[in-house]
């Protein structure tokens, strides 16, 4: 986007974000004709889900605005994150994440040659980084460290020390990755303000921070890797995708806490708009696009015959008025609230759009033996526990009972039987 003005580039960098801290610093770089550098980090723990489309779609905006993007595969952070996985397993998951992210970028039509992947352990284990970590530990209070990680680090009654280190390491990443701003979800805000406060105390520059909104899960609340019903995996087969969407909370007329509608707003419509812009070349040239995405993959989520500018279509039976086409999310939201769009029809349209995004990702997985092998190592199938056989304890039968009892002896043990005194019995007085 070399021909765009600084204001146009800044608009592309910051559109659709929930909050921007330090935006003036980015504007200054753009006015000076410099290339801003940013990083987005992810800890390779649970399997990434379709909620990742939100930040990855935004990264497409950064690239089109000529921002240099570094993706941090935070393997050390993953290990520290409440010991979710040992280092060896984290190593396999780091490779898995790289496979997934590259496939997603291809599905979105993002040129991967403009991206840099960095593993955290490549510099976080160096002498210099660790010395800075010690310097930070000598400055940060326990209160500030705990507060910074409150939205990200799992809160327990007796927290591990690793959870207190997490925010400081993420702050240092900005310096060691040599970036101008960090991008993440709004749940990272406390860590971002922590970095703004403490990095200057080590003599390092204060960075800008850009945040996207969090997308609710399909069942409401946060989309989580640990809740299988709240998220859709990138490699879920079509029947699983449709089943999960069918079960998703999408009450008729309810536009609040609606995970299906939120997904349309945060993922599907931005992708449609990106594709329309690319087709019209309004956000820069496609020169150097090495994404490998097909022409079919670059169409907006609009059905055949939709008006120009449509970003999302909902198919309906003709007896209910036929298909509806929307050029903005606001129009779709209003139609749903007025009961003009039924939840079943909305879910069907979302499923169709999502499956078109996931198809090339799953195809790439099925064609890559290496990716399949890494998946087995990163997320091994749980071994079913063998049921322990109940240990039999021998209880001897009472006298005169059981298989080997003497029937004759049993009949003699009556109330009329004479008492016999043995020679060993003590004598009684007459």
Image (cartoon, helix red, strand yellow):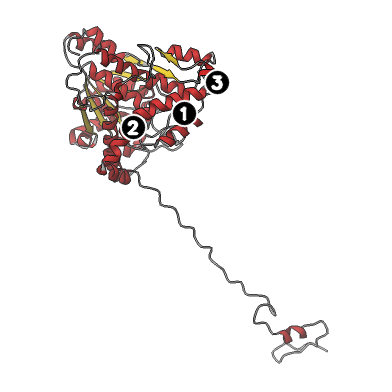
For residue 87, say whether it is visible: no
Mark 2 / mark 1, whichever is N-terminal: 1
Q: Nearer the viewer, mark 3 or mark 1?
A: 3
Q: Residues under labels 3 and 2: Cα distance?
A: 29 Å
Q: How much space separates mark 3 and mark 1, taking CA atoms?
A: 15 Å
298, above or below 125, in the image: above
Q: Are marks 3 and 2 in contact (CB under 8 Å)?
A: no
Position above or below: 116 against 207 = below
Q: Is residue 400 above or below residue 80?
A: below
Whole-percent x, y for residue 161 in the image: 36, 37
Q: Nearer the viewer, mark 3 or mark 2?
A: 2
The residue pinned by badge 1 equals: 218
What x and y, as percent, mark residue 46? Answer: 37, 37
First of labels 3, 1 by sequence position: 1
The residue tagged 3 is 252
Q: Spatial distance from mark 2 to mark 1, Cα to Cα?
A: 20 Å
Which is in the foreground here, disc 2 or disc 1? 2
Q: Name the quadrant of the N terminus.
A: top left
Res 300 → quadrant = top left
Residue at label 2?
359
Q: Residue 423 location in percent, x, y?
A: 71, 92
Q: In the visual, does 272 lie left or right of 128?
A: right
407 is higher (above) or lower (below) than 169: below
Residue shown at 48% from the left, 17% from the top: 322
| Badge 3 density bin: few <14, some 14–19, many ≥20, Cα 10 Å | some
Label 2 CA crowd tier, 10 Å (few <14, some 14–19, many 20+): some
At mark 1, the secondary structure is loop
Give the residue drawn at x 22%, y 37%. 125
């Amino acid at each position: 986007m070399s021909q765009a003005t600084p204001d146009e580039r800044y608009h592309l960098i910051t559109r659709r974000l929930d909050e921007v801290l330090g935006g003036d610093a980015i504007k200054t770089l753009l006015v000076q004709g410099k290339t801003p550098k940013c990083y987005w980090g992810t800890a390779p723990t649970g399997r990434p889900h379709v909620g990742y489309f939100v930040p990855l779609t935004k990264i497409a905006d950064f690239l089109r605005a000529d921002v240099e993007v570094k993706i941090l595969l935070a393997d050390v952070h993953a290990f520290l994150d409440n010991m979710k996985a040992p280092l060896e397993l984290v190593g396999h998951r780091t490779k898995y994440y790289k496979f997934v992210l590259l496939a997603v970028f291809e599905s979105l039509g993002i040129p991967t040659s403009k991206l840099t992947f960095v593993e955290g352990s490549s510099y976080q284990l160096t002498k210099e980084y660790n010395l800075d970590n010690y310097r930070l530990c000598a400055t940060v209070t326990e209160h500030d460290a705990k507060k910074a990680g409150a939205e990200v680090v799992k809160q327990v009654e007796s927290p591990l020390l690793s959870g207190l280190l997490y925010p400081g390491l993420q702050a240092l990443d900005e310096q060691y990755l040599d970036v101008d701003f960090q991008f993440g979800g709004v749940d990272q805000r406390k860590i971002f303000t922590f970095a703004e406060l403490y990095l200057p105390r080590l003599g390092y520059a204060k960075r800008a921070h850009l945040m996207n909104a969090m997308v609710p899960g399909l069942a409401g609340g946060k989309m989580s890797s640990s809740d299988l019903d709240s998220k859709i995996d990138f490699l879920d087969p079509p029947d699983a995708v449709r089943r999960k969407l069918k079960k998703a909370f999408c009450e008729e007329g309810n536009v609040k806490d609606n995970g299906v509608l939120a997904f349309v707003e945060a993922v599907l419509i931005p992708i449609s708009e990106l594709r329309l812009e690319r087709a019209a070349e309004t956000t820069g040239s496609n020169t150097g696009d090495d994404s490998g995405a097909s022409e079919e993959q670059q169409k907006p989520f609009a059905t055949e015959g939709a008006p120009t500018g449509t970003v999302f279509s909902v198919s309906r039976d003709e007896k209910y008025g036929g298909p509806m086409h929307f050029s903005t999310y606001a129009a779709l939201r209003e139609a749903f609230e007025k009961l003009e769009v039924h939840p079943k029809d909305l879910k069907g349209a979302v499923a169709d759009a999502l499956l078109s995004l996931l198809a090339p990702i799953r195809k790439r997985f099925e064609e890559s033996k290496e990716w399949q092998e890494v998946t087995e190592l990163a997320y091994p199938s749980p071994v079913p526990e063998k049921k322990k056989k109940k240990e039999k304890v021998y209880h001897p039968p009472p006298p005169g009972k059981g298989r080997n009892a003497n029937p004759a002896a049993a009949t003699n043990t009556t109330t009329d039987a004479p008492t016999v005194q043995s020679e060993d019995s003590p004598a009684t007085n007459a």
